[in-house]
């Protein structure tokens, strides 16, 4: 993959990239309809393919929050046309890396030394490159390390990037502008924390220590002496990312074991720690063929406020379905429904969110769930498609939900998605569930 020698740093440079891409997309539409006039076999998917290629190229060059948004969107396969979600998945662990001289420059800025003055060896090429940083392998005294280096200027460009991304989100995804405003505030807060590697170091040590008792999970050790605000050093974990793991044809028993470890990891964080690794995309996990799961990134951690926790998980009680008054109260507390919605709107929204609650809560209800059940996921995607076309939801001028929901929903979506790819049949029993209901 071709390396980048620089990243557009100023607001003007970055805005110009987006404008150029917008022009290119307009050209793609003209080209599409011209070609369709002479080739009836050309489809809308061909147009999506062209646009996805151009948008991803721009986002990957800008890196940072722009690329992170693409990564987040790629996790929701029901949100984007297939061409976009497949292309944007590359942001999870295959973005174009920065050139070695820029890596050296970052080391010299923070440590006043080059990487090879600190380590015995240091790969000149990145072994993984994603949205906010890239990883190099290093050795010292016979020990292997993973060294994550943040892209220059990422932290400084977050606010301006999100302002530029906003119209793309509204027009491309046809999202409610009020919801976008609400969620962009949350995304900005979380992205700013992700660019602080000193905070990530602290959280990585604390959360890996708190979760080390969970069976079949392992964590790297972190090294404060080789870390700083823009560089993070940890043990190198041996294993594979999900795509290569699945390509090795592991047994279903091993997949179930890893799926159970993943579920237990999230269950403990959410219900005991009230702080959760909120970035469950495949690039953040290392899997081994003996059924172990390595966790390698605590950059995105969502602290769950107690009031939101109580409201959200009230909906996981399967008996709430028969208690309309309690359900309505919870829906209003979560801003699914507002008091000033018309009675017709309230009735329609109540039915939509009741169905959503019952559907997404299914894995919790019986203490065991087969995430390999494709019918369940088809039902989820079909429901999402139906809701997106509902005129009340589509034309709503109010955000339907609170900002804390963004990363919790994202966490569960990412978790369900990985479990589905593993076809994991696991115990979803939780001491929290029994204690609460």
Image: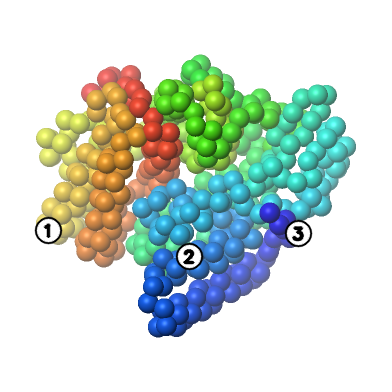
Residue 304 relative to residue 211: left or right: left
Q: Earlier in the sequence, mark 1 or mark 2?
A: 2
Q: For this rendering, which residue is in front, 307 or 41?
A: 41
Residue 280 higher or lower than 238, as above or below? below
**As rendered, which of 300 and 39 lies closer to the eye?**
39
Is 93 situated above or below 286? Answer: below
C-beta proximity under 8 Å, tags 2 and 3: no
> Along the polypeptide, which appears first: circle 2 or circle 3?
3
The residue wearing badge 2 is 49
Q: CA distance from mark 1 to mark 2?
A: 40 Å
Q: Which residue is mark 3?
A: 5
Which residue is rendered at x = 50% and y = 41% of the image? Answer: 281
- CA gap between label 1 and label 3 equals 57 Å
> How packed is label 2: few (under 14 Cα within 10 Å), some, or many (20 or more)?
some
Element type at mark 1: helix
Tell me if residue 257 comes above or below residue 138 in the rendering.
above
Q: Identify the residue position indicated by label 1 in the image.
A: 344
């Amino acid at each position: 993959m071709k390396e980048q020698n620089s990243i557009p740093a100023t607001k003007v440079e970055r805005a110009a990239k987006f404008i150029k891409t917008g022009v290119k997309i307009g050209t793609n539409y003209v080209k599409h309809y011209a070609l369709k006039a002479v080739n009836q076999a050309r489809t809308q998917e061909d147009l999506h393919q062209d646009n996805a290629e151009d948008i991803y190229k721009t986002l990957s060059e800008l890196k940072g929050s722009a690329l992170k948004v693409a990564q987040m969107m790629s996790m929701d396969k029901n949100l984007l046309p297939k061409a976009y979600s497949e292309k944007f998945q590359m942001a999870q662990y295959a973005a174009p890396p920065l050139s070695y001289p820029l890596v050296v420059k970052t080391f010299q800025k923070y440590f006043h030394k080059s990487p090879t003055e600190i380590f015995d060896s240091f790969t000149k090429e990145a072994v993984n490159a994603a949205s906010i940083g890239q990883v190099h392998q290093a050795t010292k005294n016979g020990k292997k390390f993973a060294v994550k280096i943040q892209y220059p200027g990422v932290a400084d460009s977050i606010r301006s990037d999100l302002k530029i991304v906003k119209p793309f989100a509204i027009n491309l995804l046809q999202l409610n502008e009020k919801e976008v405003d609400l969620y962009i505030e949350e995304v900005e807060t979380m992205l700013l924390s992700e660019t602080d590697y000193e905070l990530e170091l602290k959280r990585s040590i604390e959360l890996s220590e708190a979760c080390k008792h969970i069976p079949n999970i392992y964590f790297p050790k972190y090294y404060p002496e080789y870390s700083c605000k823009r560089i993070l050093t940890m043990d190198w974990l041996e294993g594979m990312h999900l795509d290569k793991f699945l390509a090795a044809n592991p047994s279903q028993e091993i997949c179930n074991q890893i799926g159970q470890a993943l579920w237990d990891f999230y269950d403990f964080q959410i219900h005991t720690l009230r702080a959760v690794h909120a970035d469950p995309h495949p690039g953040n996990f290392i899997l081994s063929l003996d059924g172990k799961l390595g966790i390698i990134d605590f950059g995105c951690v969502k602290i769950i406020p107690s009031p939101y926790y109580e409201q959200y998980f009230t909906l996981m009680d399967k008996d709430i379905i028969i208690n309309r008054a309690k359900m309505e109260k919870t829906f209003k507390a979560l801003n699914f429904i507002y008091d000033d919605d018309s009675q017709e709107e309230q009735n329609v929204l109540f039915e939509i969110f009741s169905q959503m609650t019952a559907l997404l809560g299914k894995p919790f209800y019986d203490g065991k769930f087969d995430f390999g059940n494709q019918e369940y996921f088809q039902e989820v995607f079909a429901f999402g498609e139906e809701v997106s076309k509902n005129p009340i939801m589509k034309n709503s001028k109010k955000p339907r939900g609170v900002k804390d929901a963004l990363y919790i929903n994202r966490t569960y979506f990412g978790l369900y998605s990985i479990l589905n790819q593993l076809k994991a049949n696991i115990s979803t029993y939780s001491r929290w569930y029994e204690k609460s209901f």
